[in-house]
Each structure stands twice: as C-alpha cells, then as structure tokens.
Image (spheres, rainbow, N blue to C red):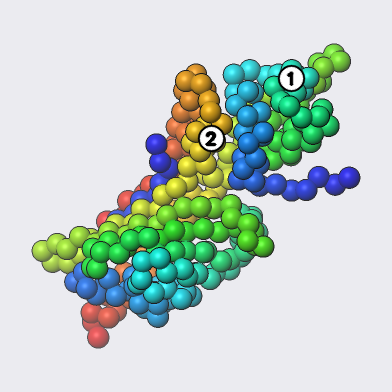
C-alpha cells in the first residue's frame, strides 16, 4: 500500500510521533524497545515509524534480527525552507513598497 | 526562543503615508499581494499569490488582524498550507512604524517558526532533551535569515 506523504508539520502534529522523536533523541532504539513505551499495537507503532522515516526524521538500520531507529535532523529542514522563502519574499516586497513610495513622492 | 525573520526599511515619507500602504487593501496589493484586508481587530482576510508546490503551499495565506495601534503597529496571523483547510504554517507578522526626524522607519518581524520548540514543550521532555533540542534550534538559527535592510 502506498504511504501517504506527510510534511514535517503533520509529522510533528501527532503526539505519539513526537514522543517517539523525544525517545530517539537520546539514543538509537530498536522498534521493539520503542514499542514498549506505547500503549498501542505493534503494527500501529510500525506505521508511525514508517511516517517518521518517510518524512526524513529518522533512519532505520537492520542490525542482526533487530531494526534500529536513529533520529536524523533533515526532517526539520522544512521550517528552514519556509524561513528562507519568507526572508527573500519580504526583502523583495519591501523593495516594491520603497519604489512605490518614492515614485509617489516625486509626482 | 523564537525563530523569526526581521527586516528594517527606512522611508523618507511620513508614517501616515507608510501606514496607508500597510492598511489600505488597494495600496497593499500594489506592493504585497492581492488581499481583502480591513484594519479591524479580529477581521479575517486572505492574501493570494502563486502556489509553491515545493513548500506544500496552495497560494493562500489565511490571516486575522491581531493588533492595531494606528500609525504605530499592526500585527496579523499568517497561516498557510497545502489546501483543504490543512494548516502547516502558523506564524505572525508584526509591523512597527517609528517616526523619525526626516521620515519613517518600518520594522517587519515575522515570528512563530517555532515548531521545533513546540515539539519539545508538547511532548513533555526532560531537561536533557531540552538541551539537545537547543542544538537543533541553534542549527536552524544558523541558516541565512534575519537580514536587516536599512
């Protein structure tokens, strides 16, 4: 089944996923040990992990029979992309305003 | 700590004139975007622009006037998302006008890029975690933004 696309904000919006990220912040964890912290079925935990992985928040690595989850920082890039976008946006818009006001003053 | 974008511009015109360009929908459209702004606290309006698929943005900013002090300050919420009422950007735009001897200083602060911080607060973290997240916030702050144009 196709995994729906989630953006960084939707990923963070879910409290279980936030808790997973919090747990993973200190160290990598196996999916089983992560699941112990949640009162939900193993498939439900796996689904959240899949979402975290596809959004770039975590990476999953197989070590022996265990699957290890590790936190990545790339998932936070979207916030930065918005900020970069608006930084340029406002600089350009304010230049428009300056040109308008100066034009007005001359007429 | 708030992540914000700041810009500062100096105009030789009076603050009344600059204020008009911030609060009159038609004048606002000339330099910013198509809008249905009205200078009334609590008034909800939108700015319309081109969609940005890279940012999962459908081209509509949903805004609500939060504060008005005529000729001095104006702030409104600034939200957006991919469409269907989903909001993924929840920020605030603040304008401050300072009258100076020969013109007006206009300060723009776009705040609320705090999702990382919210992530920490809402998940009920320990002190150690907060310290770690500070590193991410510092990392985000190292991005090139906050340029000041005078």
Q: Secondary structure at mark 1?
A: loop
How far across and how far down the image is residue B121, in percent? 50, 33
Give the number of the disc on residue B122. 2
Tag 2, which chain?
B
Q: Quadrant of residue B15?
A: bottom left
Give the number of the disc on residue A36. 1
Considering the image in quadrants, where does the C terminus of chain A appear?
bottom left
CA distance separating discs 2 and 1: 21 Å
Residue at image coords 29%, 79%: A103
A78 over B139 or under it: above or below: below
Q: Nearer the viewer, residue B29 or B62?
A: B62
Give the number of the disc on residue A46. none
The answer to whether A77 appears left or right of A99 in the picture is right
Residue at image coords 83%, 32%: A43
Considering the image in quadrants, where does the N terminus of chain A appear?
top right
Q: Nearer the viewer, residue A84 or A50?
A: A50
């Amino acid at each position: 089944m196709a995994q729906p696309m989630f953006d960084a904000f939707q990923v963070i919006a879910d409290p279980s996923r936030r808790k997973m990220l919090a747990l993973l912040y200190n160290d990598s964890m196996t999916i089983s040990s992560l699941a112990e912290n949640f009162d939900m079925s193993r498939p439900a935990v796996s689904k959240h992990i899949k979402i975290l992985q596809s959004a770039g928040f975590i990476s999953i690595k197989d070590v022996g029979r265990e699957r290890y989850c590790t936190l990545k920082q790339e998932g936070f890039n979207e916030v930065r992309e918005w900020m970069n976008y608006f930084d340029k946006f406002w600089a350009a818009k304010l230049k428009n305003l300056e040109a308008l006001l100066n034009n007005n003053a001359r007429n | 700590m708030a992540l914000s974008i700041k810009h500062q511009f100096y105009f030789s015109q009076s603050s009344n004139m600059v204020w008009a360009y911030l609060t009159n929908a038609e004048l606002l459209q000339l330099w910013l975007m198509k809008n249905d702004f009205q200078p009334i606290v609590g008034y909800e309006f939108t700015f319309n622009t081109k969609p940005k698929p890279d940012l999962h943005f459908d081209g509509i900013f949903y805004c609500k006037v939060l504060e008005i002090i005529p000729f001095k300050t104006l702030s409104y919420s600034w939200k957006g998302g991919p469409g269907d009422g989903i909001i993924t950007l929840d920020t605030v735009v603040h304008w401050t006008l300072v009258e100076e001897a020969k013109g007006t200083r206009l300060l723009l602060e776009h705040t609320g890029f705090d999702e990382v911080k919210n992530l920490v607060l809402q998940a009920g973290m320990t002190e150690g975690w907060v310290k770690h997240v500070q590193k991410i916030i510092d990392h985000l702050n190292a991005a090139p933004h906050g340029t000041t144009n005078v």
